[in-house]
Image: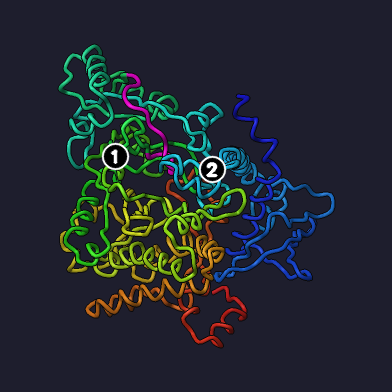
Amino acid sequence: MEPLDTCLAPHWEAANRELIAKMIGELAYEQVIVLTNDGDGQRLDLGESGAWRFQASSNLWRQPRVDPASLVPPAGASLEAADFLLALAPELGMSDAQVAEHLEDLFATLRADCRLREARRGLSADVAILLPEPQRQRLLDGHPKFLFNKGRRGWGLEALARFAPEHGNTFRLGWVAIDVNALACGGGPVDAAPLLDSALDEDEKTRLHRALAERVTDPGAYRLLPVHPWQWQQWLGPLHAADIAHRRLVYLGEFGDAYVPQQSLRTLTNVSRPSAYDIKLPLTIMNTSCYRGIPGRFLLAGPAASAWLKARARDDDEFARVHLEVLAEPAGAVLPHAQYSRLPQSPYRYRELFGVIWREALAPRLAANEQALLMAELMQVDEDGRPWLAAYLTAAGAHDTQTAQAWLTRMFEVTLVPLWHLMCRYGVSLIAHGQNLTLILRDGWPHRLALKDFQGDLRLADEDFPEAHDLPVELKDVTVRLPPDKLIHDLQTGHFVTTLRFIAPLAGICGVSEACFYRLCGDVLTAYRGRHPELAERFDRFELFAPRILRLTLNRAKFLHATDAAADRMLAEMELRVDNPLHFVRQPADAAGIAKTQEVSNV
């Protein structure tokens, strides 16, 4: 394990400082902790544990952006994030058991952060953006809101080295044969020839079929499915012992092309043949907010959902205007567990063990002068603090403020407008975060958006819109319905708070102030609204410009959630509100000034 540990000592202090700064900033944004002014800096009082002092600037969301280098712990305290969590625990209402559990995630995150720092050492932003897209993904910091965002609870050191994206290693998939009568399927055949051909070359496919013929008497009675090697060893093989005993499930071995994990861990990209289908597989590890299995109902509805969205991308003028790309999911399948599927109140991870979804890859849909990047890339900085956003602007020739504003304006047109249009015209919401939105540049400039990953990230309005009369029954039957004031939160929190909140300050480094960033955003949305007077009533219901919007408290909810025993995933706390920059940057200067200095209300 020496290669895993050599990066810890050189980066440990910096990684701890960064994590403590993030903890203070996000928990203050969530109003879980209260900061006070301390001369020209700020202070966090933690009772008997003493006071932390630091320098911080506030963004338009009232989130303090703490300078990690400025952190000064109380006398006698360490600069260890683990000790800081112990000091915070009384403020968060955490029991010793909850602290102990989350220390697992904290230490795993620090280990991964040290590895990332080593991987990015000496790599400038301008060089990083030229790397192939899978290599860029492995360099990203991960979820910006969750404090311990690389917990991967359940993976040991060997699994991390083999399957965590920051290590950059490839692996083959395991393959199983499943009795066709035991399998639930959505979309087309789950082992259709084009799907198998995209994961196995002719020699490997021959070897796989030979293994199948050697192990079963009637190969035609089975379907072939890939499985994640770790999931098979840790969960599927042990818990599906009865299926194996009754020959409903037969493990065939590892075959085929080399894959790497995307940031989401569960979605795998073929690096032997980048034009091949991506494959998404459940992983029963705890990461960020939940165990990373996949509910079977979403796997089965994914093909119908993506087909409907792909059709709208073709026939809706607004989507066509921005060249919206939808990555279809041609097939999905689930092997229900005979006993766990009959225990609806059991911990949810036992009901999300075994399945697959095939998804179109983006690579073959890119022209020679196009480049794809996750929106999460625009939150990234190099070791010298240069934003990747700045590098993308430079590569596009956007060397001055005016052209940088034009670049960002086009980014809003191709990303935000389709998301709001999907909601206002069709009553369909996509929780749009940095990992499921892919921005496609053409000659360096934002040109279009690719949407993917519809397992649980789609929601519907609580009434049927006539424009969405042909929504698939499979989708409607499994999708949560919400009133407009809650549905709009998917865009406000999912995209504005979780993505744009972290990009806007970096735009400031590129010459576009945070206020200007949101004004440009508002101008684009206002222009879209002006093109569609027929949707005026919908715009009022799905209001993006309200003075105050819901403020999610994700981290405390996670800290206090009984994850291992819970029958359902955690729900964020939604009792607080926050000033909406999209509203206040469009007010007269005096009103905006008042908004910036007024006391923040908790309701």
Residue 381 located left or right of residue 360: right
Q: Element under label 1?
A: strand
411 or 172: which is nearer to us?
411
Position in image of residue 470 (x %, y %): 15, 59
User: Where 279 sits versus 233, above or below?
Assistant: below
Above or below residue 53? Residue 245 is above
Please determine whether, in this image, residue 144 is positioned above or below residue 567.
below
| Residue at the image point whose x is 80% and y is 57% from the top | 50
Q: How is the image coloured?
A: rainbow
Query: How many marks can you see?
Result: 2
Mark 2, secondary structure of its residue: loop
Which of the pair 193/335 is nearer the observer?
193
Q: Is residue 264 magenta?
A: yes
What quarter of the picture does the C terminus occupy?
bottom right
Q: Residue 314: horizontal and vertical position, in percent?
A: 18, 58
Q: Return the mark for residue 357.
A: 1
Would you name the residue on which mark 2 appears?
A: 150
Image quarter of residue 187: top left
Percent x, y for residue 175? 31, 24
Q: Is residue 101 visible?
A: no
Residue at the right extreme of this rendering: 75
Q: Say which mark, if any, is on residue 32.
A: none
User: From which residue to which does the magenta span run?
Assistant: 253-267
Does residue 163 appear to the left or right of 535 in the view shown? right
As rendered, which of 510 and 376 lies closer to the eye? 510
Local packing at callout 2 (Cα closer than 10 Å; few below 14, some 14-19, many 20+) is: many
Quadrant of the rendered structure where residue 397 is? bottom left
The crowd level at tag 1 (other Cα within 10 Å; few <14, some 14-19, many 20+) is many
Q: Residue at left 42%, top 50%?
A: 435
